[in-house]
Image: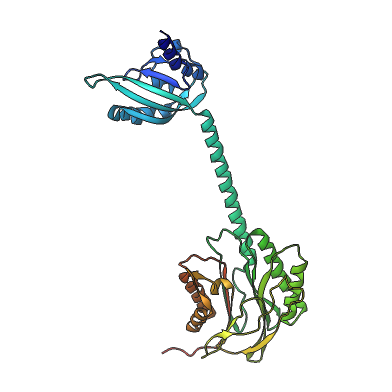
Amino acid sequence: MADATEDRLLYEHAPCGHLSTTPDGRLVRVNETFLAWTGYTRADLGERRFVDLLPVGDRIFHETHVAPSLRMQGTAREIALEIVCADGRRMPVLVTSVLDRDDAGRPVGIRSAVFDVTERRRYEHEVLAAKRRAEASEARAVRLAQTLQQTLIPPSPPHVPGLDVAAAYRPAGDGRHVGGDFYDVFQVAADDWVVVLGDVQGKGADAAVVTALARYTVRAAAVDHAAPHDVLHTLDEVLRRADTDRFCTAVLVRLRREGGTWRATVASGGHPLPLLRRAGQAAHPVGSYGHVLGIMPAPVFVDTEVEIGPGDALVLFTDGVTEGRRGPRLYGAERLAEVVDAHRATAADTTGAVLADVMAFQADDARDDIAVVTVAVDAGPRPPTA
């Protein structure tokens, strides 16, 4: 007798709801736990079927999926449903059902365990909401990064009479983060232009602030200082006084037209030297390395002057080109020079070829930002082809 009472108490007050129905789903027995959760009385349930306790959508799902599974497999495990309680509220549940058969294999009833997952569902909703908020925040950050990057990278180089100028920029990875590479081409006076290419350490919003500071400092300093090394000194001083621990490298070229040729003055602040490609000659570095900008107490920058005539070109690039990796191998300066030598049609031809080759070398997965600027002296009108 004691065992029977204990079994009854265990059934009635189990930590889950227990339901017994006929094979067609008519309720014949429910435990106290289920009644307490739902607010029904045994009289309320009377001749009702289990599906009568479900909202319309779950009824359809039960009849088209759960019931067939029970008939064919004899069980349906952890089915997510909602129970419409006596007061109209919906209680999320997980239901596991077993179909009982007699010795002849005929269905005689269905036993179901019902678990209240209200708190679990609330947690899942909170996690989903947090995930959606994070995705929305990331999407906003990506849009902001792209917008900010567009302000730091000119959409296209300006038209410079007598020069053919082309530039390319490829952010690292999937482009979601603002990189530190920047370039600019701007006019100071008639037949007097400045080209600058730089790389601020790091990525993200903090790097973008320094990038913007560097770009506009160069523009302002180039108006007051004719010599590129003086412009770099000004940029170095501004960076050291700024509230940042980020450093920068940059190469600056001042181009002045003198008669039929252009005089290029090159200065580097810790940046890879540009390649000079003369008509009929192999490309080679030009200029002298100076100190990295923004960290040295007394940096030194050196101007190097060269004349460039029709068919000559200067190719500026960031270390995302030469330090591109394929496993342990670096892209390297030698391969870059070979590509520059092999593509001489236009500045865009050279720039595009460099970008395409370094991306192919890395299997289209840039580990670092890549920026390339080519400045070529127009070769003049070409003879008509036959």
- Nearest the viewer among 271 and 16 is 16
Q: Horizontal and vertical percent for residue 204? A: 63, 59
Tell me what residue is drawn at x 52 percent, y 79 percent. 336
Q: Is residue 298 left or right of residue 258?
A: right
Image spot of residue 143 (x, y percent): 59, 55
Q: Which quadrant holds residue 54?
A: top left
Residue, x 50% and y 74% (percent of image)? 331
Asked whether the viewer can see residue 377, the reply is no
How far across and how far down the image is residue 19, in percent?
40, 19
Q: Which residue appears at 66% of the width and 80% of the height?
A: 289
User: In this figure, which colouring scheme has been used for the structure?
Assistant: rainbow
Q: Relative to 223, is 131 above or below?
A: above
Tell me if residue 218 comes above or below residue 265 in the rendering.
above
Q: Residue at x 66, y 74 (%)?
A: 250
How far across and down, in percent of the image, does residue 230 sit? 75, 79
Numbered disc total: 0
Q: Quadrant where the C terminus lies?
A: bottom left
Q: Residue furthest left?
A: 104
- 46 sits left or right of 215 in the view: left
The answer to whether one can see residue 112 in this image is yes
Along the viewing direction, whichever of 158 and 225 lies nearer the viewer: 225
Q: Nearer the viewer, residue 228 or 189?
A: 228
Q: Is residue 163 above or below residue 246?
A: below
- Placement of the N terminus among the 4 image quadrants: top left
Furthest-front residue in this view:
2
User: With respect to residue 376, does 11 lie above or below?
Assistant: above
